[in-house]
Amino acid sequence: MWTTCRKSAASRIASTTAALSRSPDALRTAERTAPQLVRNNPRVREEWLTNIEADMSRGNYTDPAAARITFKQYAERWIAAQSTDVSSRTTTETRIRLHAIPYLGSRPLSSFRPSHIRTWVRQLEDSGLASSYRRGIFANVSAVLTAAVDDGLMPRNPCRASSVTAPKPGGERVTPWSAEQVFAVREALPTRFQTMVDLGAGCGLRQGEIFGLPVDAVGFLTGWLHVGLQIKVVKGRAFFGKPKNNKLRDVPLPNSVGQALTQHMQSHPPVNVTLPWMRPDGPPVTKRLIFTGPQGNHVYRSNFNISPWKPALLAAGLIAKPDDGGPLPSAREHGMHALRHFYASVLLDAGDNIKALSKYLGHEDPGFTLRVYTHLMPSSESRTRKAIDTLYKSASEGDEAQAA
C-alpha cells in the first residue's frame, strides 16, 4: 500500500510540477516547499498535492513567497510600469501615496481580506474627502489589486467582494454661475486675461486648454476653434500635451468670442513659447500662444489661480474676504471650470442635445455629460410653454405688421 501511495504521489507531484513550470516563481516555491511537507509522511504529501491541484484548477494558486510582497512595494512597481500620460500617472501616484499606502501599505498581498478594504473605505469617508475624489482613489487601489491577481500574487481582488461598497457618486449638483457673475469676474480681471473668460464661457475650454491656445487653432474665417493642445503641470514643471483623455475636438467659435480674441491679440500680441512636449523632459516644441503672462512667458497656473483669479472672485462677490485678513479662501467650485458649467447650461437651455454638448466639452462619454448636467436640461413643460409662447408671439407680431 505504501508503495502504491508513493508511486501515486510521485506521479502527481510530477504533473503538478509540470503545470507549475509555466510560472518559474511558483515552480521554485513548490520544489522548495514540497519536500519539507512530504519528506516522511506520504499522506501529508497526498493532501498537499490535492490542495495544490484544486487551487490550480480553480485558478486560485498563489505563490506563497511572492505573495509576501506588501501593497506598497507592489503599488510602486505598478505605478512605474503604467503607460498612461505623465500627468495621469502623477495623479494616480499622489492618490495612492497619500490615501492608500498610509493605511494599506505594509500589508502583504496574500493577507488582504474584504474587511480590510471596508475599514479603509470608511477611513476615507471619515477623512472628509469629496466623494468623487474617494471614488478615484478606490478605483486606483482596485486596479493595483487586480494587477496583483493577474500576476498570481493573490487569489482575488477584495475590492470586488460583494460585501465591499465602493464610494458612491456625490449628490452635489452643479450650480452654474449667472451671466452677471460671469461678466463681473471678467471685468475684475486684468485686461490681458479677460478674454480667457470668453473662451471658457463661450467655447467651454478647460483652463489648460485656454493657457495653451495657439493662434493657428482659431478659425476666424471658418467659425471653428480646434482644441488640440493644453499646458500641463507636473510637480511644478510645465509642458505641452494633448487635451484630457487625448480628445482632440472642434468647437463652434461664436462671432462675439472671435471678436474678443481679435481685440485681445491687437492689445496683447501673441508670443512664441517653447515648452517640452508630452512630458517634463520631452523634446522642445514652440507654439505661438494667444495668452501669456506679464513677463512674456506662458501663464503659470498656480500663480494665476492665486492672483488674479481669486481677487476677481472676491470683486464679483463669489467668495468673501476672511475677517482675520488672511489669504483668500480656496474655492474649488469657483475655479475656471465654472465657466465650462456656464457654457453647458447656456447650450442646454438653448436646446442643444447632450451628444453635441459632450463632444464640445471633450467628454469621453455622453453618459457622463448627462449625469453631470441632466438637472440643467429644460423640463418638457418648460419647453412646451416656451414653444407655444414663441408661436403666439410670432403670430401677434405678424398681425400687428399687417395692421400697420
Image: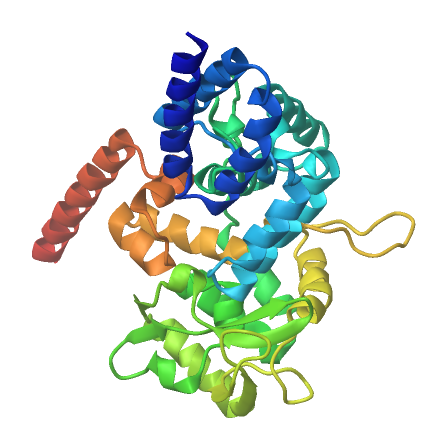
Residue 271's place in the image compared with 336, above or below, is below
The answer to whether residue 355 is left or right of residue 121 is left
Residue in the foreground of this view, choosing between 159 and 139: 159
Q: Residue at x 26, y 84 (%)?
A: 221
Q: Quadrant of the C terminus?
A: bottom left
Residue in the foreground of this view, choosing between 302 and 204: 302
The image shows residue 349 at horizontal and vertical percentages of: 33, 46
The image shows residue 5 at horizontal and vertical percentages of: 42, 13
Q: Quadrant of the N terminus?
A: top left
Residue in the foreground of this view, choosing between 356 and 66: 66
Task: State the colouring used for the structure image.
Answer: rainbow
The image shows residue 253 at horizontal and vertical percentages of: 33, 71
Q: Is residue 376 visible?
A: no
Residue 106's place in the image compared with 50, above or below, is below
The answer to whether residue 316 is left or right of residue 201 is right
The image shows residue 372 at horizontal and vertical percentages of: 42, 41
Residue 199 picture quarter:
bottom left
Q: Residue at x 72, y 32 (%)?
A: 127
Residue in the foreground of this view, choosing between 348 and 157: 157
Residue 122's place in the image compared with 31, above or below, is above
Q: Is residue 287 visible?
A: yes
Considering every residue shown, the one lying at the far top of the view is: 1
